[in-house]
Image (cartoon, rainbow, N blue to C red):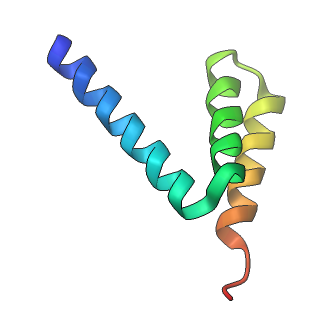
Amino acid sequence: MPVLALLSAVCVVTFEQITQWRYGTTGIIGLLLLTIGIKVKSSFLSSVGGVMLALLVARPAP
């Protein structure tokens, strides 16, 4: 079980670092709001986080 928890933590940290590198601070805030909204079962927070991430991904290419 500890190996599974360690592997999960490594995956989460890696995903967060890739998000920060690609989408900056706004991406991390969106991901944080989405995660917190899911954990506390708040549809408002998860919706705000999801919309932020969707807007970051859908922005026009430079």
Q: Is residue 6 visible?
A: yes
Q: Is residue 1 visible?
A: no
Q: Position of residue 60 (x, y in %)?
A: 72, 82
Q: Position of residue 46 (x, y in %)?
A: 73, 34
Which residue lies at the image location 54% right of the left edge and 63% below the top edge? 22
Is 7 above or below relative to 41?
below
Which residue lies at the image location 66% right of the left edge and 85% below the top edge? 61
Is 14 above or below relative to 45?
below
Residue 36 falls in image quadrant:
top right
Which residue lies at the image location 34% right of the left edge and 27% below the top edge? 9
- Say whether residue 8 is left or right of residue 57: left
Q: Position of residue 37 (x, y in %)?
A: 71, 26
Which residue lies at the image location 61% right of the left edge and 30% below the top edge? 35
- Viewer-side residue, 44 vs 8: 8
Image quadrant where one finds the N terminus: top left
- Viewer-side residue, 14 vs 33: 14
- Viewer-side residue, 40 vs 8: 8
Residue 4 falls in image quadrant:
top left
Residue 31 falls in image quadrant:
top right
Residue lying furthest bottom: 62
Task: Give the number of marks.
Answer: 0
Image quadrant where one finds the C terminus: bottom right
Residue lying furthest top: 1
